[in-house]
C-alpha cells in the first residue's frame, strides 16, 4: 500500500489500483455524511477531482492519484457514508481504476514515510 | 490562539479532549472526542452541556427603580413588547437599525427590578455601546463579566438539572428564576438554542467549573461543542446571526413576525417607536419581496451557505440563496435555510440549488425540521 500527500492510499490488485482515504484524513474530516462517486468508465488523469466527500464540517475533493479508467466504485458508501469513518483502509475503499501510467507510484510514500509526515 | 479570550471553562474543555477553535474572539470547543454527529444525537436523546460564556450578559437597571421604565426605554430599540413581559419571564427580541435590518438578536428577561439581556458574542461590544448610547438616561447598562453561561439541553435536561437545583423542575418554557445553590446564586432560564427543552444557567465564574463538572458527572449529560450546536439549532429552524439574519434582513423577511407582538404593530397601543419601524410595520401589512424558508434537498448532497437557488434547472438568474446548510443527524438527511423570492416561497415548492455546477432539487419546507420539544 502506498500513500499520497493528499492523504489517499493506493493498493494494487494486479493492474487495478484500489483507492481510499487514510484514517488520519477520515478523522480530520469528521463524520462523513455524503459521497459523490464518478461513473464507471470515466477516464481520469492524475490530480483530477474525482470524488466529493462531505463531512459534518465541509466538502473535500478526492483526486485521482494516477491516470486511468474508473472500473468500479464502492456504491455502499452512497447509502452509508459513515463507513469511511469506521473502516477507511478496508471496507470503505472508494474507487478502483485501471491504471494507464504507473510511474507516479514511485513518488508515493510507503507507510512509515506517511506516518512520519502526519506525525 | 494567543490573542483569543478564554471562558472560565477553557481548562475543562482541554481536559475533556475538546478541539478548540477561534470563535467570535474566544477559544471555544468545536467538538469533543465523541464527535459532532454523536454529540448532536446525544443531545436530542438525552442531554448536552454547552459552554456559551462567550455570549454577552447585560443588566439594564432602571434609575427610577421601576422596571417598567427600563422596559419602555428598551422598546425604543426592539420591535417586541418589553413592557408586556411579566416578571420571571423571558422573550426573544432583536435590535433593529433605521433601515429595519437586524443588528443582533437577543433574549430579554424581566427579573423583577431589572431587565437581563443575553446577546451574541460577536455583537456584544456593539450592542452594549448601542444600549449605552440610547438607554443611559433611564437605565444603568451593566455588562456582567463575573459570570459564565452554560446551557443544558435535551429531554433529560430537567432530570439532570433538578438533581442539583430542584426548583428548575417547576419552570415552564421561557420562565426565569434566581436561585441559591451549592454553586452560588444562579440565574436560570428555561430556554435554549437546540429546539429541545432545557436551561441556560448564568453562574459566577468561580463556581462555573464545579457546576459544569457536576452536570457532566451525570451519565445522561455529555459536553457538546459548537459543531453540534450549529446542526441542532438548524434542525430546530433557529437563526444564526450573521448568516440567516443580519443588517440587510428585516425581521419580516426573516419570518420572525411571531416575535413582534400586536401591541407594537400598526393599531397597537405602543405601535412603532423602534428603529426602522416604518419599514417593518409596512412589511407586516403588505408583505415582503423575499423571505426566509426551510429547504430540504431531495438528494443526499448537503447545500451549504452561499448555494444559489433557482426556479428551474435552466433559469439564468437565482431567486434565492442558502444562508445555512448542513447534514441533519436526527433527520438523517441534509437540510438548509435561506432566502427566496416570496412567489417561490410556498411550502412544497420545488426549487433547484446549484452545487458544484449541478442543479439539484430542493423542496421549500416548514421549519423546524425536528419537532420542538419545549415544556409549555
Image (tube, coloured by chain):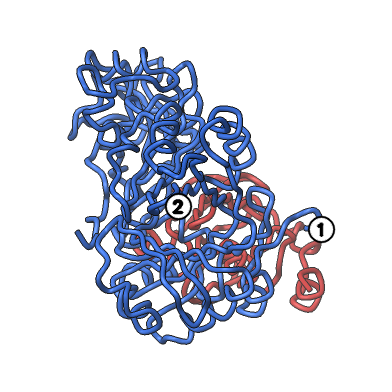
Chain colours: A red, B blue
Q: Distance between the residues labelled 1 and 2?
A: 41 Å
Residue B261, picture quadrant: top left
Secondary structure category for the residue under label 1: loop
Instruction: Report the quarter where the N terminus of chain B lies.
Output: bottom right
Identify the residue under disc 1: B2
Q: Residue at x 39, y 49 (%)?
A: B109
Is there any visible trace of residue B18 in the rendered image?
yes
Q: Which of B56 and A22 is in front in this view?
A: B56
Image height of B134 relative to B27, above or below: above
Q: Position of residue B91 (x, y in %)?
A: 34, 46
Q: Position of residue B62 (x, y in %)?
A: 48, 41
Q: Residue at x 22, y 41 (%)?
A: B366
Is disc 2 on the same chain as disc 1? Answer: no
Residue B38, picture quadrant: bottom left
Secondary structure category for the residue under label 2: loop
Q: Residue at x 81, y 74 (%)?
A: A116
Image height of A56 relative to B254, above or below: below
Q: Position of residue B373 (x, y in %)?
A: 24, 61
Tell whether label 2 touches label 1 (CB within 8 Å).
no
Label of residue A37 in the image: 2
Q: Where is residue B345 in the image (x, y as percent from the top left)?
A: 25, 26
Label of residue B59 in the image: none
Amino acid at each position: 500500500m502506498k500513500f499520497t500527500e493528499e492523504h489517499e492510499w493506493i493498493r494494487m490488485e494486479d493492474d487495478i489500483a484500489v483507492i481510499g482515504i487514510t484514517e488520519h484524513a477520515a478523522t480530520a474530516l469528521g463524520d462523513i455524511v455524503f459521497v459523490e462517486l464518478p461513473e464507471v468508465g470515466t477516464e481520469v488523469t492524475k490530480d483530477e477531482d474525482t470524488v466529493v466527500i462531505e463531512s459534518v464540517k465541509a466538502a473535500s475533493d478526492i483526486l485521482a492519484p494516477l491516470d486511468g479508467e474508473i472500473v468500479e466504485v464502492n456504491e455502499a458508501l452512497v447509502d452509508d457514508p459513515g463507513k469511511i469513518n469506521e473502516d477507511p483502509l478496508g471496507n470503505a475503499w472508494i474507487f478502483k481504476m485501471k491504471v494507464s501510467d504507473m510511474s507516479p507510484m514511485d513518488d508515493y510514500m510507503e507507510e512509515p514515510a506517511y506516518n512520519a509526515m502526519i506525525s | 490562539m494567543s490573542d483569543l479570550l478564554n471562558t472560565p471553562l477553557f481548562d475543562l474543555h482541554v481536559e475533556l479532549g475538546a478541539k478548540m477553535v477561534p470563535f467570535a474572539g474566544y477559544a471555544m470547543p468545536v467538538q469533543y472526542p465523541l464527535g459532532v454527529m454523536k454529540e448532536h444525537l446525544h443531545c436530542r436523546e438525552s442531554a448536552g452541556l454547552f459552554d456559551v460564556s462567550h455570549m454577552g450578559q447585560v443588566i439594564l437597571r432602571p434609575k427610577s427603580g421601576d422596571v417598567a421604565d427600563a422596559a419602555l426605554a428598551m422598546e425604543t430599540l426592539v420591535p417586541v413588547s418589553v413592557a408586556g413581559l411579566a416578571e420571571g419571564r423571558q422573550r426573544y427580541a432583536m435590535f433593529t437599525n433605521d433601515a429595519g435590518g437586524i443588528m443582533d438578536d437577543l433574549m430579554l428577561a424581566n427579573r423583577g427590578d431589572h431587565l437581563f439581556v443575553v446577546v451574541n458574542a460577536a455583537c456584544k461590544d456593539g450592542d452594549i455601546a448601542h444600549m449605552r448610547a440610547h438607554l443611559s438616561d433611564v437605565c444603568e447598562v451593566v455588562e456582567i463579566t463575573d459570570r459564565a453561561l452554560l446551557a443544558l439541553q435535551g429531554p433529560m435536561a430537567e432530570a439532570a438539572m433538578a438533581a442539583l437545583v430542584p426548583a428548575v423542575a417547576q419552570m415552564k418554557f421561557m420562565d426565569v428564576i434566581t436561585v441559591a445553590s451549592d454553586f452560588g446564586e444562579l440565574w436560570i432560564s428555561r430556554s435554549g438554542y437546540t429546539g429541545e427543552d432545557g436551561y441556560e444557567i448564568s453562574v459566577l465564574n468561580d463556581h462555573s467549573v464545579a457546576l459544569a463538572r457536576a452536570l457532566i458527572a451525570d451519565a445522561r449529560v455529555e459536553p457538546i461543542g459548537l459543531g453540534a450546536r450549529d446542526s441542532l439549532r438548524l434542525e430546530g429552524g433557529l437563526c444564526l446571526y450573521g448568516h440567516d439574519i443580519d443588517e440587510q434582513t428585516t425581521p419580516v423577511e426573516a419570518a420572525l413576525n411571531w416575535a413582534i407582538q400586536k401591541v407594537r404593530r400598526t393599531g397597537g397601543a405602543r405601535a412603532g417607536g423602534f428603529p426602522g419601524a416604518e419599514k417593518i410595520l409596512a412589511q407586516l401589512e403588505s408583505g415582503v419581496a423575499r423571505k426566509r424558508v426551510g429547504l430540504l434537498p431531495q438528494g443526499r448532497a448537503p447545500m451549504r451557505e452561499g448555494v444559489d437557488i433557482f426556479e428551474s434547472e435552466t433559469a439564468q438568474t437565482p431567486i434565492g440563496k442558502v444562508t445555512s446548510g448542513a447534514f441533519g443527524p436526527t433527520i438523517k438527511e441534509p437540510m438548509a435555510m435561506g432566502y427566496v423570492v416570496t412567489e417561490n416561497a410556498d411550502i412544497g415548492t420545488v426549487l433547484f440549488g446549484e452545487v458544484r455546477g449541478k442543479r439539484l432539487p430542493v423542496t421549500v419546507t416548514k421549519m423546524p425540521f425536528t419537532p420542538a420539544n419545549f415544556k409549555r
